[in-house]
Image: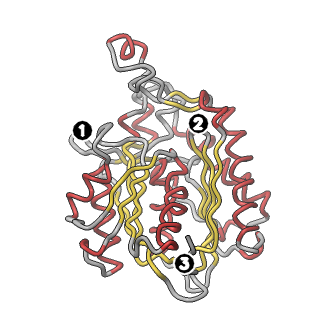
Amino acid sequence: MTYKKINIGIKGSGSYTPEKILTNFDLEKMVDTSDEWITSRTGIKERRIADENTATSDLATKAALKAIEEAKVNSSEIDMIIVATVTPDMFFPSTACFVQKNINAINATAFDISAACSGFIYGLSIASQFISSGEVKTVLLIGAETMSKVVDWQDRNTCILLGDGAGAVILGEGEDGKGILSVYTLSDGSKTNLLMVPGGGSREPISIEVIKKRSHYMKMEGNEVFKFAIRGMEKSIDEALKKANLTYEDVTLFIPHQANIRIIDSLTKRMGLPKDRVFTNLDKYGNTSAASIPIALDEAIKSGRVKSGDIILMSSFGSGFTMGAAVIRW
């Protein structure tokens, strides 16, 4: 198949986070921790938590409607809906199909992808190729998570990290010289044991024993994940910039996955980027997995941090291990 060279741009963005705020001081009453300990080690001060009646598709729908409104498109014009999530409403149907129903996108192909925290970057890669091939013109890409529903609230090492939210973008043909310049993705399946939800799937179906062992909740080897996250993100950044024929010096704004301030600080130090060229919001939301980058991107746009001609670098790392980076000229 011969691909036509198309500049693929972001036509609109939107994000949504639940109203309920869980602070570090709230967590002090739940597990053996402290605001000082959490802040110094993660940079997180609070996170948003969905209520028991709210599913991932509910958050995704609200973010999607904002992106649709900003892009000035009709839901019927959307050709494809991709939802990146590891906390779907259910095993099947896909969360994307629920979103499709909610926004009445009657002409769309809808499906989920599971790449954990790197899901939005993987989604950019998939959407770009569908648009470049001419198969579709308009894609709704969403990163959405309700991580609070898979976290073990008795595990002080993981429950302090995670929050809920959704971010969305409308992708389509953009202006000449602007749009997505490169996307790079990579996986390392040899490290699947370091970050996972072991119970509830086909390998360990849900049972009384699974619930007793609490293996239906997230498990993480924090120190090992930390080391691999820095290496993986650095590699993906280098490769994405190389594909775009750019260097660290060309980056106007770096939007990293919002997991841990120490990871972000380590990366930006290696890259030689000053803090005013790095966007962070993990102090407000914690780690929202696949929703992390699209929420941060939307906030950066809405706050005026992104201007025409800027080079935006995004990078993430997640369970799998998955890693990826994307470069966009705004």
Instruction: Determine the residue positioned at 60% across, 58% down.
Output: 256
If you read the primary sequence from the N terminus, does the residue marked by circle 2 or circle 1 appear first?
A: 2
Badge 2 marks a residue whose secondary structure is helix
Around disc 3, counting alpha carbons within 10 Å, would you say few (fewer than 14), some (14 to 19), or many (20 or more)? some
Residue 102 vertical placement versus 174 (above, below): above
If you read the primary sequence from the N terminus, does the residue marked by circle 2 or circle 3 appear first?
A: 2
Badge 3 marks a residue whose secondary structure is loop
Q: Nearer the viewer, mark 2 or mark 3?
A: 3
Residue 202 vertical placement versus 163 (above, below): above
Circles 2, 1 touching at the beta carbon (< 8 Å): no
Three-letter amino acid code of the residue under disc 2: Trp
Three-letter amino acid code of the residue under disc 3: Val
Cα distance, mark 2 to mark 3?
33 Å
Three-letter amino acid code of the residue under disc 1: Glu
Around disc 2, counting alpha carbons within 10 Å, would you say few (fewer than 14), some (14 to 19), or many (20 or more)? few
If you read the primary sequence from the N terminus, does the residue marked by circle 3 or circle 1 appear first?
A: 1
Looking at the image, residue 292 sits to the left or right of residue 30; the answer is right
- Residue at which label 1 appears: 52
Horizontal and vertical percent position of residue 75: 25, 71
Instruction: Determine the residue positioned at 69% across, 32% down.
Output: 224
Horizontal and vertical percent position of residue 306: 54, 78
Q: Which mark is residue 37?
A: 2
Q: Quadrant of residue 314?
A: bottom right
Badge 1 marks a residue whose secondary structure is loop
Cα distance, mark 3 to mark 1?
35 Å
Instruction: Determine the residue positioned at 64% across, 76% down.
Output: 311
Q: Which mark is residue 325?
A: none
Around disc 1, counting alpha carbons within 10 Å, would you say few (fewer than 14), some (14 to 19), or many (20 or more)? few
Q: Which mark is residue 306?
A: 3
Q: Quadrant of residue 140?
A: bottom left
Instruction: Determine the residue positioned at 77% across, 74% down.
Output: 249
Q: Quadrant of the N terminus?
A: bottom right
